[in-house]
Image (cartoon, helix red, strand yellow):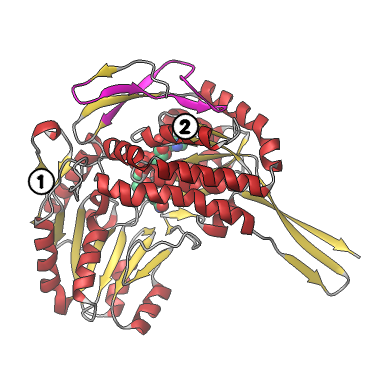
Amino acid sequence: MVAEQVVYNGNYLVETLANFINGEYCPPVNHQYINNIEPATGLVYGQIPHSDQDDLTLAVSAAETAFPAWRALPLEQRSEILLNIAQGISNNLDELAKAEAIDNGKPISLAKTVDIPRAASNFKFFAHACSQFASESHAMENSAINYTLRQPIGIVGCISPWNLPLYLFTWKIAPALAAGNCVIAKPSEVTPKTAYLLAKICQQAGLPKGVLNIVHGTGASIGSAICDHPKVKAISFTGGTKTGAAIASQVASQFKKLSLELGGKNPALIFSDCDFEHTINEVFRASFANQGQICLCSSRLYIERSIYDKFKNALISKAKALSPQDPLDENSKMGAIVSKDHLHKIKHYIELAKQAGGIILCGGEQVQLSGRCAQGYFLQPTIIENLANDAICNQEEIFGPVITLQPFDNVQQALALANDSQYGLAATVWTSNLSRAHQLAEQLQTGIVWINCWLLRDLRTPFGGMKHSGVGREGGNEAMRFFTETKNICIKY
Ligand code: NAD
């Protein structure tokens, strides 16, 4: 690994990360760096390239040179390289999981069991998907036939957020590469470390130079430059709704292909006939996993009135038993909030809830740990009730360990409350009445509905949101279609 300078901050060696361009680690052209802070300690533990247009020029040129050979590589060989990358990720599970826990503040056990295995699965899945991807042919009655080609686009941009760093980074890169494209990828500047480590794995896996280029830095500088570059023909973006809107207007005049996976404010509809124990456990996990920082986390809980108090009290007792710990502790179930700014944003929302008459049933306070985590960004799991559905905390995405509870009296009311949102990413329904579940699934305005489960993922299924939660779908053939250009050929014979 390239380390330009090594400084000791009391906990770690402060490592200087590098871009990965044309198969090599390299410093940013401007030699400017940004601090990377460990959320559990509040200390600077890394420097990341503050890349700009000059780095992008190098990356685009490398990708352009690599593209003809990469697109022409026999499918079997392309697939084999992607499988090597998957294997490389699995072989480095411990190092990657530790890097993710330090960078993001998530419990190391979560990184080991979810984030890193899923990153390997992403490569494995698309290594196979590219060999199974077929296109259509349409025969016509008047001696003509159509067939459709789906060809690689060329150079594509992949921009990802901080909450599931390697998991979401690879969720974009794997299908883009599998479809035969060359990629310019930018991880979040808040959590760059595992993307940096992935580059070495790609080198070792035999990925040809220039096929994947990873540039680090801020959204305003390198992120925006990627979106703007005329040779980057498609952008796959996951992040906040405001950023998605800015990117959509920025690229509109260039008519780029655009996939936007954005924010959510996900409802959970809990009926009195649910399997109580199972539902409590799963809804609790859906509310507070990764400190509530998963776009799919439930944040608005609608509970049938007859079980409202029982469900509320069970949630409160579980929340009181969950306290943040050092993310590097193998027993930690709750880690740190990703950054100081994000912690302040969440605390601000809790204040707004109080001002709007919300009752804080538990949590609501920052937590100070001792030892190495004394300056870290920790927050109690927080449950709020007594807020109207149009209150800010029921309408805006908080993206933290904060949920609101509201009772409902009938299905229509529950549905109306759930759909009363600008967002439409994921909903969960908890009931043993399957016909009611199916009816609700049809009418919920979200791209994903989970019935009696949460975050149960089959990588073949379409993934994404409606309304302000995004445009387009990822996963399976949806991703292969996004990362290819469609061409229909009609032959008269
Ligand atoms: P963000 O929008 O601030 O940043 C996401 C990425 O975009 C980062 O890499 C950032 O550097 C880059 N970026 C910022 N401004 C840019 C610009 N103008 N041009 C190009 N790139 C730019 O989001 P975040 O705070 O990193 O992530 C949290 C958000 O992501 C939440 O809203 C969450 O719901 C959403 N999210 C959505 C999904 C989904 O699948 N729908 C998944 C995970 C996270």
Type of amino acid at the residue the image marks with label 2 = Lys
Q: Which residue is pictured at 70% across the width and 36% down the height? A: 68
Q: Which residue is pictured at 58% across the width and 56% down the height? A: 129
Marks 2 and 1, the one that precedes in the sequence? 2
- Asked whether residue 113 is in view, the answer is yes
Q: Which residue lies under the disc numbered 1?
A: 365
Residue 420: image quadrant is: bottom left
In this picture, is 317 found above or below 237? below
Residues drawn in magenta: 9-37
Q: Which residue lies under the disc numbered 2?
A: 200
Query: On the rendered image, what quadrant is the C terminus found in?
Result: bottom right
Q: Is residue 14 left or right of residue 331?
A: right
Q: Which residue is pictured at 50% across the width and 28% down the height? A: 20
Q: In x, y percent, where is residue 434?
A: 35, 82
In this picture, is 229 found above or below 120? above
Q: In x, y percent, where is residue 119?
A: 43, 47
Residue sitting farthest toward the right: 493
Question: How many marks on residues?
Answer: 2
Query: On the rendered image, what quadrant is the N terminus found in?
Result: top left
